[in-house]
Image (tube, grey):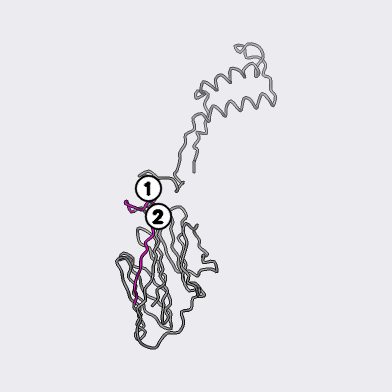
């Protein structure tokens, strides 16, 4: 946004050379006879318009421009980046995906996706941004149904996971506002007797409990805590998690099978 600041007082002393030439051209139109003897003034709408035009040009010549950086797609200077990061807000939440896998997000979507198997089980997520505000939202697809749980026993389930984040620059590989993605595979152990779902790899830890198939608990992405929600069945489990700290808002999901 460019704000133009103008001095409301237009002084003839501030007229630049170009305007002076225009005034010299106008004077014969404004007056008849010798200027030294102050001849009769010809007052007409055309004359008045030209005089006002000159005055406007004279006053606006001294205007100063003040520009504020609002093009967030452009590479900011160090000073602008410091200002952006100081004003950054980062939020995350669960949501209910619509039939097409999108959400009723309040921020402009900058990244979205998810995973769905052949039976319609899966999850969806979105990252949003408006200026220096970032959001992450994720949810389990409404048609997800992994079947009945066995009363006892346990199962080892493996599969892919993905995590996506956006927010501040990390000073190394992620620029301000860029989306950074992390993907891998994880093995989870479902204990049907005690109702627990646990597993870990180098960057992701799942620590959940379940009752009547519904999973709740925590996830840890590079030791950063996230809220976990999902569903488990006899032979598979699906989950989605979200979190935000002072660096980024992030969201992720997994679908594992025996």
Q: Would residue 44 be found to the left or right of residue 201 on screen?
A: right
Residue ID for mark 1: 81
Q: Which residue is drawn at 47% across and 67% down?
A: 124
Q: Residue at x 51, y 66 (%)?
A: 101
Q: Label for residue 226?
A: none
Q: Is mark 2 on a helix, strand or loop?
A: loop
Magenta span: 170-188
Q: State yes or no: residue 191 in magenta.
A: no
| 51 lies above or below 200 | above
Q: Which residue is drawn at 50% across and 61% down?
A: 106
Above or below: residue 35 compared with residue 200: above
* Depicted 138 relative to depicted 7: above or below: below
- Is 180 within the magenta? yes
Residue 134 x %, y %: 43, 58
Counting from the top left corner in percent of width and height, residue 61 is at 51, 28
Mark 1: few/some/many CA within 10 Å (<14, 14-19, 20+): some
For the residue pair 28 and 43, the one nearer the viewer reads as 28
Label 2 CA crowd tier, 10 Å (few <14, some 14–19, many 20+): some
- Which one is nearer the viewer's eye here, 247 or 89? 247
> Horizontally, is 36 left or right of 214 in the view?
right
Q: Which residue is drawn at 46% across and 46% down?
A: 71
CA distance separating discs 1 and 2: 10 Å
Quadrant that contains the C terminus: bottom left
- Res 30 quadrant in image: top right
Q: Which of marks 1 and 2 is nearer the N terminus?
A: 1
Quadrant of res 100: bottom right
Residue 88's disc number: 2
Whole-percent x, y for residue 236 in the image: 41, 77
């Amino acid at each position: 946004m460019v704000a133009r600041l103008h001095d409301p007082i237009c002084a003839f002393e501030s007229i630049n050379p170009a305007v002076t030439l225009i005034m010299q051209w106008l004077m014969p139109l404004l007056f008849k006879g010798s200027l030294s003897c102050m001849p009769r003034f010809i007052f007409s709408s055309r004359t008045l318009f030209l005089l006002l035009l000159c005055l406007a040009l004279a006053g606006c010549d001294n205007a100063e421009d003040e520009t504020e950086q609002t093009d967030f797609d452009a590479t900011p200077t160090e000073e602008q980046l410091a200002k952006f990061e100081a004003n950054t807000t980062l939020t995350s939440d669960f949501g209910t995906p619509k039939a097409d896998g999108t959400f009723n997000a309040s921020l402009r979507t900058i990244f979205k996706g998810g995973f769905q198997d052949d039976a319609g089980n899966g999850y969806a997520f979105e990252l949003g941004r408006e200026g220096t505000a970032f959001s992450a939202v994720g949810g389990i697809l409404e048609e997800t149904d992994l079947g009945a749980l066995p009363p006892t026993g346990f199962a080892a389930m493996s599969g892919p996971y993905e995590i996506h984040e956006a927010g501040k620059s990390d000073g190394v590989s992620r620029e301000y506002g860029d989306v950074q993605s992390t993907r891998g595979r994880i093995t989870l152990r479902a204990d049907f007797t005690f109702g627990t779902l646990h597993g870990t790899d180098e960057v992701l830890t799942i620590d959940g409990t379940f009752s009547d198939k519904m999973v709740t608990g925590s996830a840890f992405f590079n030791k950063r805590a996230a809220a976990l929600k999902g569903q488990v069945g006899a032979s598979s489990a699906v989950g989605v998690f979200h979190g935000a700290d002072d660096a980024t808002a992030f969201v992720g999901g997994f679908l594992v099978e025996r």
